Image: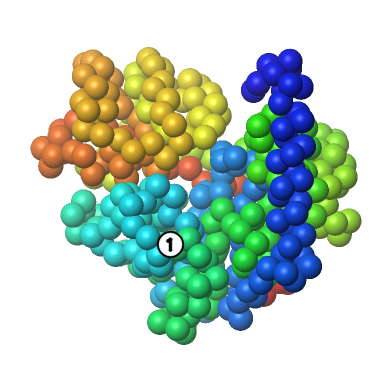
């Protein structure tokens, strides 16, 4: 959070940035820039703010939802993202030999959990909250030009029935059938400003493109009056008929790097995260474990062996290293087999859980749109 005085000083620049994004949106809305409307059912998941709203857990929620339908068949669902931080270019479908460097950390996380049946180099796939029947059922893809990527995907795999677009709300070149806009309960867009005074990627009015709003990272105790108050603030910027849902994040038991099995006991922990906003994670770890120290890295941080050695040197007897799933796929690649098998290393699975009543409403909303 920027100091108030600095925010006010930067507001003129935010207005300029807002005008630039307004012009870009107008070019798409007026038809001067082309918008591709896929023939296959497509859901976009995104936000107005820079990072940290729970997009990847939401994509995982949708994967599990579609994988568990009675008529579900392998690979009828595909995910598509830009593949932030990867060294490769163009359209790419995830394979067993991919790394975070070739695919991006979040797509690799999805592939490890849902894209393959067995990870040949690392043993059984981490399932977390995912039922084993979900693995080997999703095609994970990356591509900067997502309109081209969808067309290439459908040309190669015409059996694809749906595509889930990750971080695509500002990617106007594709118009999904459903645009899901996520808002962090702790950082509402209706009190924020465009860059550089705030963290918005565009003006608040961009929420008008949303087909549904999902308020994420909500406390389980969030009352109905508080939900209504938040909804009223959101509706100042959305279409009147747009539904608003409330959801939280639920952490599972820590899983070991070595066996991908939940640990029965974990006391003192060294927490390592490379997230846009790790505050809620830190609060949870403080409540459940004895947090010795939290090493915060930048979002999508590319860990080096030097980073890993520095972290491992901080471990003391009776202490475990705990990290996120997104960071696990990068740290795990730096380990030797002996280190993986013997060191007290764990990652923390997380899943989206809708607040009471909203899960059924969301299911009905998705079904009605298909």
Residue 255 pos. (x, y %): 33, 40
The answer to whether 286 is drawn above or below residue 182 in the figure is above
Give the quarter of the image for residue 343.
top left
The residue positioned 88% from the left and 56% from the top of the image is: 240
Residue 81 pos. (x, y %): 48, 58
The answer to whether 261 is drawn above or below residue 8 in the figure is below
Residue 156 pos. (x, y %): 40, 82
* Quadrant showing the N terminus: top right
Q: Residue under circle 1?
A: 142
The residue positioned 26% from the left and 17% from the top of the image is: 314
Q: Do we see residue 255 in this rendering?
A: no
- Number of marks in picture: 1
**Element on which disc 1 rests:** strand
Q: Is residue 271 left or right of residue 150?
A: left
Q: Nearer the viewer, residue 367 or 28?
A: 28
Residue 117 pos. (x, y %): 30, 64
Give the quarter of the image for residue 366.
bottom right
Q: Nearer the viewer, residue 367 or 199?
A: 199
The residue positioned 34% from the left and 22% from the top of the image is: 270
The answer to whether 232 is drawn above or below residue 309 in the figure is below
Give the quarter of the image for residue 364.
bottom right
What crowding class fits label 1: few (fewer than 14 Cα within 10 Å), some (14-19), or many (20 or more)? many
Q: Nearer the viewer, residue 114 or 260?
A: 114
Q: Nearer the viewer, residue 118 or 171?
A: 171
The residue positioned 43% from the left and 62% from the top of the image is: 142
Q: Is residue 266 left or right of residue 213?
A: left
């Amino acid at each position: 959070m920027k100091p108030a005085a600095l925010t006010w000083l930067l507001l003129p620049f935010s207005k300029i940035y807002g005008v630039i994004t307004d012009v870009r949106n107008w070019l798409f809305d007026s038809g001067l820039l082309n918008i591709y409307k896929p023939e296959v059912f497509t859901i976009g998941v995104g936000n107005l703010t820079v990072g940290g709203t729970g997009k990847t857990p939401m994509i995982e929620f949708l994967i599990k939802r579609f994988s568990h339908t009675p008529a579900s068949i392998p690979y009828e669902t595909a995910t598509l993202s830009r593949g932030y931080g990867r060294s490769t270019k163009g359209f790419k479908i995830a394979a067993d030999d991919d790394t975070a460097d070739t695919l991006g950390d979040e797509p690799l996380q999805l592939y490890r959990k849902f894209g393959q049946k067995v990870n040949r180099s690392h043993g059984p796939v981490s399932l977390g909250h995912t039922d084993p029947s979900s693995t080997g059922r999703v095609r994970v893809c990356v591509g900067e030009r997502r309109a081209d990527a969808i067309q290439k995907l459908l040309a190669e795999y015409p059996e694809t029935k749906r595509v889930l677009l990750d971080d695509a709300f500002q990617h106007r070149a594709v118009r999904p059938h459903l645009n899901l806009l996520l808002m962090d309960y702790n950082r509402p867009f209706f009190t924020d400003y465009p860059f550089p005074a705030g963290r918005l990627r565009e003006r608040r009015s961009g929420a008008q493109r949303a087909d549904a709003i999902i308020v994420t990272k909500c406390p389980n105790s969030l009352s109905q009056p508080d939900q209504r108050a938040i909804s009223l603030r959101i509706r100042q910027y959305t279409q009147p008929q747009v539904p608003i849902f409330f959801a939280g994040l639920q952490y599972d038991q820590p899983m070991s790097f070595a066996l991908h099995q939940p640990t029965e006991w974990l006391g003192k922990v060294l927490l390592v995260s490379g997230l846009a906003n790790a505050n809620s994670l830190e609060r949870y770890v403080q409540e459940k474990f004895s947090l010795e120290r939290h090493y915060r890295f930048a979002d999508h941080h590319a860990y080096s062996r030097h980073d890993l050695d520095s972290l491992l040197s901080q471990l003391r007897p009776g202490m475990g290293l705990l990290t996120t799933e997104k960071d696990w796929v990068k740290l795990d690649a730096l380990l030797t087999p002996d280190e993986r098998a013997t060191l007290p290393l764990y990652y923390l699975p997380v899943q989206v859980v809708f607040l009471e009543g909203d899960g059924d409403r969301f299911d009905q909303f998705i079904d009605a749109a298909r």
